[in-house]
Image: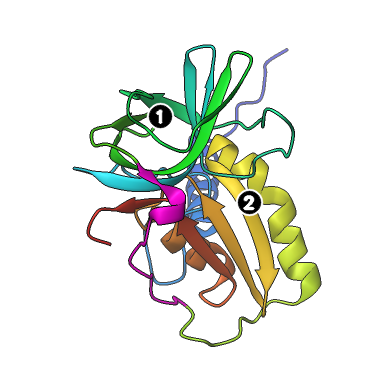
Amino acid sequence: MRRLRRPLGIVAAGALVLLAVTACATSTPGSDAPRASLGAVTPVPPDGEVTATGTVLDLGGDVRLCLGPVAESYPPQCSGIPLEGWSWDGVDGAETSGDTTWGAYAVRGTYDGESFTATQPPILLALYDPIPLPDPTEGRPGTGDDATLEGIQAELPDRLGDSYLASTPQDGWLWVDVVWDDGTWQDAAAAEYGSDLVVIRSAIRDMDG
């Protein structure tokens, strides 16, 4: 018994239809490029020196710079990024309990996307007077209702991974704190959710910003 063979023309036509559908599904109207998705893109590490404020936690020689929440225990506990080039010599404001030493500081140095390297003496956080950042919303309320903002908030930890620090809904906006953003995630959030819903705030700042 002979097998029936599908005409090559039908196969080719089906492939063309599939390609067209795929292209429509991955592109924004009027653009051939796929839309950026928050969490699917990665910010480029900064060039030069930057500043970060937080808790420096040294647990038996494993030094971390904690930029997010810190557990109110004694000694405190937090998860942070590795801090290289750190020394407690001559540094005020530190406390020690057992093999844990900690303190709150403004730290200056470089960030390679994974670890922070201190290049200058730290400043005690209580004495640090940073340059105020402009309000990216310019005082305008956002357009998100509680359900929308809570839905976005629930999915961000998985999408941003260890770079996610915290988020807070306020005045129709979701304010999202991350370790570092050069504008890549802000642009992706605007493309995905609209320009009046999500504000990305970078815990690590450019020295001149």
Nearest to the observer: residue 50 or residue 189: 50
Position of residue 34 in the picture relative to residue 14 (left or right)? left
Q: Secondary structure at mark 2?
A: strand
Q: Which mark is residue 92?
A: none
Judging from the image, the colouring scheme is rainbow
What percent of the width, then of the height, locates residue 194? 55, 72
What percent of the width, then of the height, locates residue 132? 38, 70
Identified by mark 2, the residue type is Ala
Residue at image location 54% in from the left, 54% down from the top:
177
* Residue 102 appears anywhere in the view: yes
What percent of the width, then of the height, locates residue 157? 65, 44
Main structural element of the magenta stretch: helix, strand or loop?
Answer: loop
Position of residue 62 in the picture relative to residue 49 (left or right)? right
Nearest to the observer: residue 123 or residue 24: 123
Q: Residues within 10 Å of mark 2 (few under 14, many from 20)?
A: some
Q: On screen, 188 above or below 46?
A: below
Badge 1 is on which residue? 114
Q: Earlier in the sequence, mark 2 or mark 1?
A: 1
Nearest to the observer: residue 120 or residue 184: 120
Q: Magenta residues, as a range?
A: 123-136
Q: On screen, 186 above or below 22?
A: below
Q: Secondary structure at mark 1?
A: loop
Residue at image location 47% in from the left, 65% down from the top:
28
In this figure, what is the number of numbered marks?
2
Badge 2 is on which residue? 166
Nearest to the observer: residue 128 or residue 15: 128
User: Hey, which residue is sitting farthest right in the picture?
Assistant: 147
Q: On screen, 206 above or below 47?
A: below
* Residue 34 appears anywhere in the view: no
Identified by mark 1, the residue type is Glu
Q: Residues within 10 Å of mark 1 (few under 14, many from 20)?
A: few
* 41 magenta-colored: no
